[in-house]
Image (cartoon, rainbow, N blue to C red):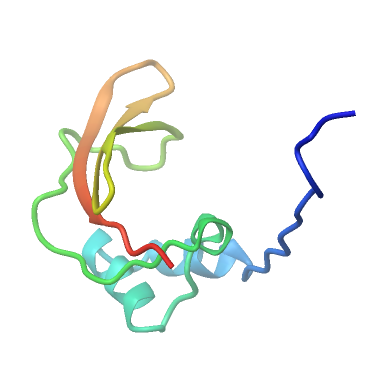
Amino acid sequence: MSDWGEARTKTVTWHDPAISRAAAATMTGREFLEAMIDGRLPPPPFAQLTGAELVSAGDGVSFLSPANGTTLEVEGRALRVGRQIAFAEAHARTAGGKLVGHATTSLALLRG
C-alpha cells in the first residue's frame, strides 16, 4: 500500500466536437478561434479537462503549405514552464511526414 493519500477524481464535461468541426469548415483559423473566445463555439474538450481558456488570437501562426482535406499529426511540447509564464511549440505534419505547420506560444499562468 502506498502513502499517496486518497485518490482524487475529476468530472469533465464537453460539447460535441462535431459542432466545432462543421463550423471550422466555413471559417478561417482566426475566425474559428475568435468564435470560441466570444462563446459562439464551445471550447475544445482538452480545455475543459485542463482548465485552459483561450482569451485572444492574433496574427502570426500560419501554415507552411496547404493541408486541405488531409489528416495531420500535430505534436506539441512545453519548452519551459516557469512560475508565471510557459513557452511551447507545435509542429503539424501530413501522414507522410511533410511539415505543413509550425507554431510557438507563450502563456501566462494563472494559478489558483
Q: Nearer the viewer, residue 73 or 69?
A: 73
Measuring from the top left, give residue 36's x and y in whole percent: 38, 73
Q: Nearer the viewer, residue 2 or 29?
A: 2
State the residue at coordinates (21%, 40%). Answer: 103
Measuring from the top left, give residue 93's x and y in whole percent: 34, 26
Count of residue discs = 0
Looking at the image, residue 4 sits to the left or right of residue 20; the answer is right
State the residue at coordinates (35%, 32%). Answer: 77
Residue farthest right in this picture: 1
Specify the quadrant of the image occupied by residue 41: bottom left
Measuring from the top left, give residue 79's x and y in whole percent: 26, 31
Residue farthest front in this picture: 3
Q: Nearer the viewer, residue 10 or 61?
A: 10
Looking at the image, residue 42 sits to the left or right of residue 5; the answer is left
Is 20 rendered above or below residue 103? below
Looking at the image, residue 46 sits to the left or right of residue 34; the answer is right
Specify the quadrant of the image occupied by residue 18: bottom right
Is 66 rendered above or below residue 83? above
Give the position of the N terminus as an image quadrant. top right
State the residue at coordinates (41%, 83%). Answer: 40
Give the position of the C terminus as an image quadrant. bottom left
State the residue at coordinates (22%, 69%). Answer: 56
